[in-house]
Image (spheres, rainbow, N blue to C red):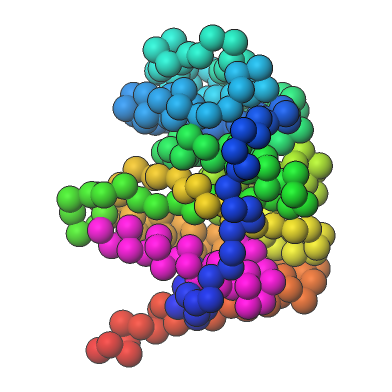
Amino acid sequence: MTDLLVPTRPLHPHAVAGVPPGRRPTRRLTVLTPLYRESAATFERSARAIAALDYPDELLQVLWLVEAGAAGDRDAARAGAAMAAYRRAGLDWRLLRLPGMSPKGAALNHAFPYAEGEVIAILDADVVPDPGQAAEAVHALEQGHALVQAEEFSEPGTGLTARAKAGEDAVWHASVRGLKRLAGVHVVAGSSVYAWAATWDLVRPVRADDVEESYHWSLRLMGAGVETGFLASPSRVSATERPAAALRQRARWTRGQLRAVAVSWRGLPPRGRLLGAVTVGSLAARAALPVVCA
């Protein structure tokens, strides 16, 4: 939501220039993926992405998160089928039935105690990371970063909504990288993000009363003064073809970010207030745009 007020150039450089040839990861990595009332195709797509990750099986833990009780039985069945079809020998890939899955912050609060990795990643159900992304992320963290995230781009779609979403993704990621370089603030997108377990402790417990939990992370990390960065290896997100769904999603994000700024403002450091001001200003500009055009 920052893209209307932030120059897209210059872009902030990537955290690292790739993984050195022959370098093998040595850190235990846990991947958390919340799956809440997803289609069978989404489960299969996510399983294929896990199977394709170029990371040593003995160092990788994957935790799929679904709802407990009868409400989550269909998700659990779909998860089991997808895991069986794409399981890698030696990979610690588990299904966790959790008491709360919505919003995502509730699921993460229940799941973090099960994460055994030095590094913990959050990959949403509709995200397909580049196979080398995990190794690149861990390498970037070892170079001094506390948190790194991948840029996410919508897969090609046939409809106008999908094409508009893909263009918006490109502009948004350019704007947040420009904001990082110009003002030193980092907007965390919470679905292709990797951080040390100790970094996650800075934002735990995750807010479970808001859909924009990652924006709260952004504000809190500004106060902690940790080093964050962007990865060169991208993630692909399933295309959005339905205009109504896309608009509802934008409305939830807008409401969540405005609420995050309002409830956090009093305790924010200067950089956090700068990020909040840019966000509010950008949203105001978006709201005024139809009037200006008219």
Hey, which quadrant is residue 111 in on the image?
top right
Viewer can see residue 94: no
Q: Is residue 142 visible?
A: yes
Q: Is residue 249 above or below residue 186?
A: above
- Which range is magenta? 163-188
Q: Is residue 10 above or below residue 76?
A: below
Q: Does residue 35 appear left or right of residue 213 in this picture?
A: left
Task: Establish if 89 lies above or below 12.
Answer: above
Q: Quadrant of residue 94?
A: top right
Q: Please provide percent x and percent y for residue 65.
A: 56, 26
Q: With 100 as the anchor, is 289 left or right in this view?
A: left
Rendered residue at 48%/34% (across/down): 131
Snapshot quadrant of residue 58: top right
Image point 55% across, 25% down: which residue? Answer: 64
Residue 108 position within the rendered picture, expressed as x and y whole percent measured from the top left: 64, 36
Q: Residue at x 50, y 77 (%)?
A: 9
**Residue nearer the viewer, 175 or 268:** 175
Q: What is the number of callouts on the image?
A: 0
**Is residue 90 depicted above or below 5 in this figure?**
above
Q: Main secondary structure of the magenta part?
A: helix
Taking the magenta stretch, the answer to whether it contains residue 274 is no
**Residue at position x 53%, y 70% from top?**
11
Taking 290 as reference, is 186 left or right? right
* Residue 207: image location, x then y, percent: 68, 48
Residue 174 lies in the magenta stretch: yes
Tell me residue 125's x, y (percent): 46, 35
